[in-house]
Amino acid sequence: MQDKDCNDVLGDEAKRNSFKKYGRRNVLKTTAGLGMLTLAPSSVTADNGSSVKEAGVSHEFNQLIDDCKVDKALKLLDENNVNYTKVTESISANTEGVSTQDFYDKGSSSVTFYTNEWDKSKNEYAIGLGWTVEGYSNGASGPAPVDVPVLAFEDDIFGYVDDSARGTGNVEDHDGGSEVDGKLSIKSEPGNPHEDAPGNSLIAEFTDDVRDPNLDFYPVGQGVIQMVIRKQNTSSKGIVSGLYTHTWSSMNVGKLPVLDNLSITIPGTGISVSVPSGVDKWELPNSTDRDQEI
């Protein structure tokens, strides 16, 4: 696989090196049985603008995504009058149910969920999820999390465009001076789903657990996943979803194979992720913004 440079997901200009794009990886085990979340979708307006393909910027857009420059990629769409939506959210230090035991600077951790019209002639859309997770730089000790980004679509409305899944992830010092790449692996994708995973989802693992003498004890983690889907039922609007789940635990329980014990439910109109006993989490976007209607 080809190494790629990666800058901050939300558009920071500090230089990063040796970022990787990942394809299929080992798959995770998921189970069913979780309740639905109540979600408030927003819409991609496709009346006046063009698609990424029509604007002739698909290669440039994907290159920016592979470099984790989500803000720049969406600015490119603005400049070319391409239809898209985005939701960017941060988790604050006073968020209910989130304590300092997560060992992360929550005010600096943010996630962007975006959708765009990819190819108007084929009724195709790209959906993506980008994140920046800030760790404390004061040397505080604590357990290392393993995080789970997920994209999904309503499968009676959409179908997956084969081989369109892409993802990158790394960790680096707060000042951007050193980094470790290859921290993201795709665990299941719609074109090659694991037998226990929802067939209408792209599921990845982002590992920001590093103990490298060249990095801060808790460095900055960043990454992005994206896929293209085709609208097969053009008479109705459908739901697409994006969710980033950050996990942590006391006594390093979170260093065990957490993903093998996750429960991920994607019934067609939302994502719900449940972690094992002893593991805590926060999630972005919140329950009113993690869905888009297109």
Image (spheres, rainbow, N blue to C red):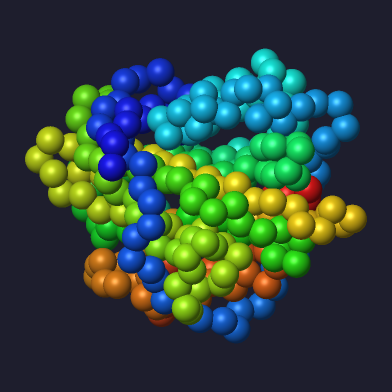
* Residue 85 seen: no
Residue 5 occupies quadrant: top left
| Image height of 44 relative to 293, above or below | above
| Image height of 83 relative to 161, above or below | above
| Image height of 280 relative to 86, above or below | below
Question: With 172 as the anchor, is 58 left or right in this view?
Answer: right
Q: Where is residue 82 in the image (x, y as percent from the top left)?
A: 72, 26
Quadrant assignment for the N terminus: top left
Q: Which residue is drawn at 61% across and 79% down?
A: 34
Q: Position of residue 240 (x, y in %)?
A: 69, 54
Of 130 and 26, nearer the camera is 26
The furthest residue to the front: 121
Of 108 and 176, nearer the camera is 176
Q: Residue at x 25, y 53 (%)?
A: 209
| Image height of 263 relative to 1, above or below | below
Q: Where is residue 129 in the image (x, y as percent from the top left)?
A: 54, 45
Question: With 71 as the anchor, is 49 left or right in this view?
Answer: right
Question: With 11 as the anchor, is 7 left or right in this view?
Answer: left
Say how many tags the image has. 0
The furthest residue to the left: 213
The furthest residue to the bottom: 33
Q: Residue at x 13, y 44 (%)?
A: 212
Q: Residue at x 63, y 43 (%)?
A: 126
Q: Where is residue 261 in the image (x, y as percent from the top left)?
A: 40, 78
Residue 87 occupies quadrant: top right
* Residue 132 seen: yes
